[in-house]
Structures are given as structure tokens and as C-alpha cells.
């Protein structure tokens, strides 16, 4: 312990101003920068490289081992099939996209509402959550025939299946975000006279947004799975229906074309969700990136 | 004292988890005058944080009564500012918007218009400048150090000029130098606005530096065993903490804590 408080404060130690870097150091820094940029470019190109390599290997294997087209068509014959059938593929793909988007939108609305409800009340949580889990573990493929009995063949069963597949992750994640608001923060707001609604609006919902967007990326792919599932079981249109018809005619390249179009749509939707996530909830990721600085 | 105390706690008890749960507080009686700064210290687990929640009405008392500003507390007060060890700033808001939060909650209707917003913003900026956060209004919480976040948290607790300020170990997680800086900041703010303050702390020097009166609680179930007025003149300076008078106050408090802990250890002997 210093005997005199003011002595502890002392004077700032004078530091010599750093002189300009010598030239060789400068060139070394620039080199390093360039190497970093190269590395970044390579990382960005990597997924495309992997895809191209995989396709090449596939084509090569099919040709070398003389695999029959109705077992595994080569990428080139899938591409040929795609160009040949582009118009029906586009029509059915758009149908599937529409079905999925409607089901997915409904899942968002209901998932946010129910998630907020479950997350904000321990009682509702206890009452509904077991039911939700039970419901989520039902194989949806078994539900489709029931939906067909209720709504007939066509897009309603597909929309509902798409909804059912994506609704659960959204609900659970939103609920988790709201339920885990720090107790101290809740106390701060309650001591200001905040109602439960205010706390959810000011803290719960914004806080659950990163959870929500993380779930969207899972939900959108599940949503596609749901529509295609229903289309294959009981559809008159959509990419799932197209694939079933194609495979019953041994048009295997067309089946593969359908698969590729589906995953392309799914990846595109995922990318959109990821971009929106980054814009809306950047605050959730920024901390880690610069906290060390 | 002619005036009625601002906070009156009369034989309050608090038990968690049903009739056979833990008794956190037993027959705690404490009065705090308007504009007084009271520090509550005691061994860990003595129910200091429980006391905070009873006074603000966040939890109901099991028996006894709590009266604040002449009214029985039976639901959360809407006049209190609180700050905790964890700054609990909202990470999606910048510092200014974090400090603006109380206005959005306390009287949302009055604070909705553009004029009101500008006026509130001015108040926030002024307060932030006073605690040394001028120029950081548009920074995100994660861009600030722990001590700076705690300054912002104090601003949030004070900006709506609450009559009652409840601080639960607000400086507990900070290093000594930052902590001592913030003692002075808090003292200045308190002398400016004169809210009634109840500060819960583990740090006896902190209690002696800041408070008009230090209240020592026993081990669980907590009750008040000693109250000691601190008559040092204000504004208190850090240099004063090295004076013989201050040291003797701190030593005195320390002895009482030891007594409280021994009592507790006997009660909870394994």
C-alpha cells in the first residue's frame, strides 16, 4: 500500500513516437497482405472446386465402369435430360417453390407466435412442450395420407406437410431465446414497472432473433423436404411428382435432374436466410470477432 | 428524524420453496431515509440480494411488511433503478439506446413524440458525459471495456431520475482501480440527484467510502445485526481511504463481519 494516494497515480511514461517503418518492412507487410488475400480468394472458390471435382469423378467412374444409365446416369446425361425437359422441370419446380414458400411462411408466423407464448410463460411451456415434442416425432410420411383424406390430392397436403416440417424448429428456437433472458435484466425492467408484454417486446424478441434465424436455415430445408414428400406420396404436380413419374418410366436422368433442381432451390433459399440473418442479427456475432482486439 | 423513512422494512421474512424451504431472511427490520445512501454488507449467502428483490417488490415477503414511499409494496415498484454486477446491456442496441431504455418503459406514451425523444436523448448524453462516456454513445456494448459497460449500466439505472436506486454488487467484477474510479463517479451522481440508495456489496472499503450508514447482516437467515453511521465529510476522496479514521472504520466493520460469519458457521456446522 502506498502511503500517499496521489503518488500512485504517477505521471504517464513518455513514449518515443514510432518513426516510419523502414522500406524492407513495408514490402514484407504488403507481401503478407497479398498472401492473405490469395488465401481468402481460394477459400471462397473452394466449394465450387469441390463440386466440379466431384462431378468429374462421377462422370469418370460411370464411363470407366460402364454403369447403366438407369442405375446411375452420368452428369452429362443428367444435363442433357435437363435441357431436353427444361419446360416441365421449370413448371414443376415453380410449383414446389410456391408450395414450400406458403408452408414456410405459415410456419414462420405460427412459430414466432407460439414460440413467444411458450417462451414467456412457464405454465404454457410445461403444458404444451411435451405435446410439441410428441407431435414432432410423428413421421410426416404417415400424416400425408390423412391429409389427403381431409383435403384431397393436390397442393393443400403438400403445403401443410411443408408447414409441419418447418414449424417445430422455429417454435423451439424462438421459445429458447425468450425463456433465457437474464434474470437480472428482467429485474431491471420489472423494477421500472414493465409489463410482461413490454419485456418480451423490448428484450425477449430481439434476443431470440439469432436463435430464430439459425432455425430458419434448418427450417427452410425441412420445408422443401415436406413439400416434396407430399408431392411424391400424393401429388399431381411439383418436382416430387415429376420425379415419381420419371422413375416409374425409368427416366432415371430426369429423376436426378429433379434432385439437383431441388437442392439448388434449397441452397438458394438457405443463402437468402443466411444473408438476412447477417444483416439483422450482426450484433450477435460481432462480439466474438473483435473482443480480443 | 421527523420525516417518515422512505423505505421501511418491518420484521420481514422470506422463505423459498414452500413451508419447509430455505429461510433466507428472518425478521429483518430496516429503515432508510429519503436521500440516504445505505450500504448492506454481510457474509455471502446472507440474503442481501433477496433484500433487494423484496424492497423493489420483485418478490413478495413471506411475512412482515415492506413500505416504500408510504405505500405497502405488493407488486414491482415502478420507480426504482437497478444495476447488478453484470452490466446486462442489450447487445443489439448502442450505448445511447441502452440508456434510453427506461424512458421507453416508464412512461411510454409521454416519451413517444419527437420532442420528448430529443429531450430524453439530451438527458442521456449529459449523463453519459458525466460518467466519462462522452463520444461512446454510438458504440455497441461489446466495444466497451467491463468498467465502461458498468458506467453505462449505472446511467441506465439513473437516467429517469428514480427515487430509489438499488445496486447489487455493481462493481464486484471490476479491478480495483476501475472500481475506485466508479466509486467517485457514483458519489458524484448521488450528490447531484440525491436518490435513496441501497447498495449491496462485499467490499467493506466500498461500503465505508460511499455510504452514510453501513448495515451488517447476519449469516442466513439474514437479519440486521449492526448499523454504523459513517460520518466522513463529502465529497470523500480516495486519499481519505488511507486516513487512520477510515482504516479504523473498515477494521471495525471487518470485526462485525467476522462475528456474523462465526454465528453462521455454528448454525451451519457440518
Image (cartoon, rainbow, N blue to C red):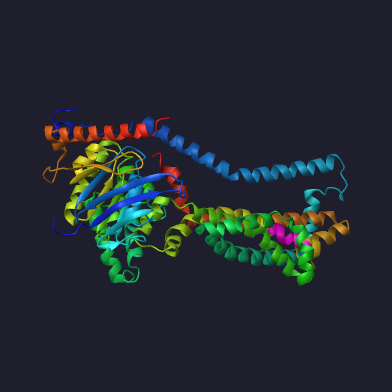
> Is B147 left or right of A56, judged from the image as shown?
left
Q: What residue is shown at x 17% (from left), y 46% (from top)?
A: B212
Q: How many marks?
A: 0
Closest to the observer, A72 or A37: A72
Looking at the picture, how far across and down is residue B34, in whole percent? 19, 56
Residues rendered magenta in the picture: A224-231
Depicted B255 relative to depicted A79: above or below: above
Q: What residue is shown at x 68% (from left), y 45% (from top)?
A: A51
Confirm whether the magenta stretch covers residue A227. yes
Q: Which quadrant holds the C terminus of chain A?
A: top left
Q: What residue is shown at x 20% (from left), y 40% (from top)?
A: B208
Confirm whether the magenta stretch covers residue A135. no
Depicted A161 relative to depicted A20: above or below: below
Looking at the picture, how far across and down is residue A48, in whole percent? 64, 46
> Is B263 left or right of B206, judged from the image as shown?
right
> Where on the picture, by quarter, is residue A289?
top left
The answer, for residue A12, to whether it is visible in the render is no
Looking at the picture, how far across and down is residue B190, in whole percent? 20, 52
> Please, which residue is most extreme toward the left here?
B233
Task: Please name the predominant secondary structure of the magenta segment in the image.
Answer: helix
Closest to the observer, A259 or A120: A120
Looking at the picture, how far across and down is residue A148, in whole percent? 78, 68
Depicted B226 relative to depicted A114: above or below: above
> Where on the picture, by quarter, is residue B246?
top left
The answer, for residue B183, to whether it is visible in the render is yes
Q: Which quadrant holds the N terminus of chain A?
A: top left
Amino acid at each position: 500500500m502506498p502511503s500517499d494516494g496521489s503518488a500512485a497515480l504517477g505521471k504517464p511514461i513518455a513514449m518515443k513516437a514510432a518513426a516510419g517503418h523502414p522500406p524492407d518492412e513495408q514490402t514484407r507487410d504488403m507481401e503478407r497482405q497479398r498472401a492473405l488475400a490469395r488465401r481468402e480468394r481460394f477459400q471462397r472458390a473452394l466449394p465450387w472446386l469441390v463440386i466440379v471435382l466431384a462431378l468429374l469423378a462421377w462422370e469418370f467412374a460411370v464411363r470407366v465402369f460402364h454403369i447403366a444409365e438407369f442405375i446411375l446416369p452420368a452428369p452429362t446425361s443428367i444435363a442433357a435430360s435437363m435441357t431436353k425437359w427444361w419446360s416441365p422441370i421449370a413448371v414443376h419446380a415453380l410449383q414446389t417453390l410456391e408450395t414450400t414458400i406458403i408452408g414456410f411462411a405459415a410456419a414462420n408466423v405460427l412459430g414466432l407466435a407460439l414460440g413467444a407464448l411458450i417462451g414467456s410463460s412457464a405454465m404454457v411451456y410445461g403444458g404444451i412442450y411435451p405435446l410439441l415434442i410428441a407431435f414432432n416425432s410423428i413421421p410426416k410420411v404417415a400424416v400425408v395420407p390423412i391429409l389427403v383424406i381431409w383435403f384431397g390430392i393436390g397442393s393443400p397436403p403438400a403445403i401443410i406437410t411443408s408447414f409441419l416440417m418447418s414449424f417445430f424448429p422455429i417454435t423451439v428456437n424462438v421459445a429458447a431465446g425468450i425463456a433465457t433472458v437474464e434474470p437480472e435484466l428482467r429485474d431491471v425492467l420489472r423494477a421500472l414497472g414493465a409489463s410482461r408484454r413490454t419485456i418480451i417486446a423490448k428484450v425477449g424478441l430481439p434476443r431470440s432473433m439469432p436463435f430464430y434465424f439459425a432455425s430458419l436455415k434448418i427450417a427452410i430445408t425441412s420445408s422443401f423436404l415436406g413439400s416434396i414428400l407430399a408431392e411424391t406420396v400424393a401429388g399431381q404436380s411439383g418436382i416430387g411428382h415429376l420425379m415419381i413419374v420419371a422413375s416409374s418410366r425409368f427416366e432415371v436422368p430426369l429423376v436426378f435432374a429433379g434432385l439437383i433442381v431441388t437442392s439448388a432451390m434449397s441452397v438458394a433459399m438457405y443463402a437468402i436466410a443466411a444473408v438476412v440473418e447477417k444483416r439483422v442479427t450482426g450484433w450477435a456475432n460481432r462480439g466474438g470477432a473483435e473482443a480480443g482486439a | 428524524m421527523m420525516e417518515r423513512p422512505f423505505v421501511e422494512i418491518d420484521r420481514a421474512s422470506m422463505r423459498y420453496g414452500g413451508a419447509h424451504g430455505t429461510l433466507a431472511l428472518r425478521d429483518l427490520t430496516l429503515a432508510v431515509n429519503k436521500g440516504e445512501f445505505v450500504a448492506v454488507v454481510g457474509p455471502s449467502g446472507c440474503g442481501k440480494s433477496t433484500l433487494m428483490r423484496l424492497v423493489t417488490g420483485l418478490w413478495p415477503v413471506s411475512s412482515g411488511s415492506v413500505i416504500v414511499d408510504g405505500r405497502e409494496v405488493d407488486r414491482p415498484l415502478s420507480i426504482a433503478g437497478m444495476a447488478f454486477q453484470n452490466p446486462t446491456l442489450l447487445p443489439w442496441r448502442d450505448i445511447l439506446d441502452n440508456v434510453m431504455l427506461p424512458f421507453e418503459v416508464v412512461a411510454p406514451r409521454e416519451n413517444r413524440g419527437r420532442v420528448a425523444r430529443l429531450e430524453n436523448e439530451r438527458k442521456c448524453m449529459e449523463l453519459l458525459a458525466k460518467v466519462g462516456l462522452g463520444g461512446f454513445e454510438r458504440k455497441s456494448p461489446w466495444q466497451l471495456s467491463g468498467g465502461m459497460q458498468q458506467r453505462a449500466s449505472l446511467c441506465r439505472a439513473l437516467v429517469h431520475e428514480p427515487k430509489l436506486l438499488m445496486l447489487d454488487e455493481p462493481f464486484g467484477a471490476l479491478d480495483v482501480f476501475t472500481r475506485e474510479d466508479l466509486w467517485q463517479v457514483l458519489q458524484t451522481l448521488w450528490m447531484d440527484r440525491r436518490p435513496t440508495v441501497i447498495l449491496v456489496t462485499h467490499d467493506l472499503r466500498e461500503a465505508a467510502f460511499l455510504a452514510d450508514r453501513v448495515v451488517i447482516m447476519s449469516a442466513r437467515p439474514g437479519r440486521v445485526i449492526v448499523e454504523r453511521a459513517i460520518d466522513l465529510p463529502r465529497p470523500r476522496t480516495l486519499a481519505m481511504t488511507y486516513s487512520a479514521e477510515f482504516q479504523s472504520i473498515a477494521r471495525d466493520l471487518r470485526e462485525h463481519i467476522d462475528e456474523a460469519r462465526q454465528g453462521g458457521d455454528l448454525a451451519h456446522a457440518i
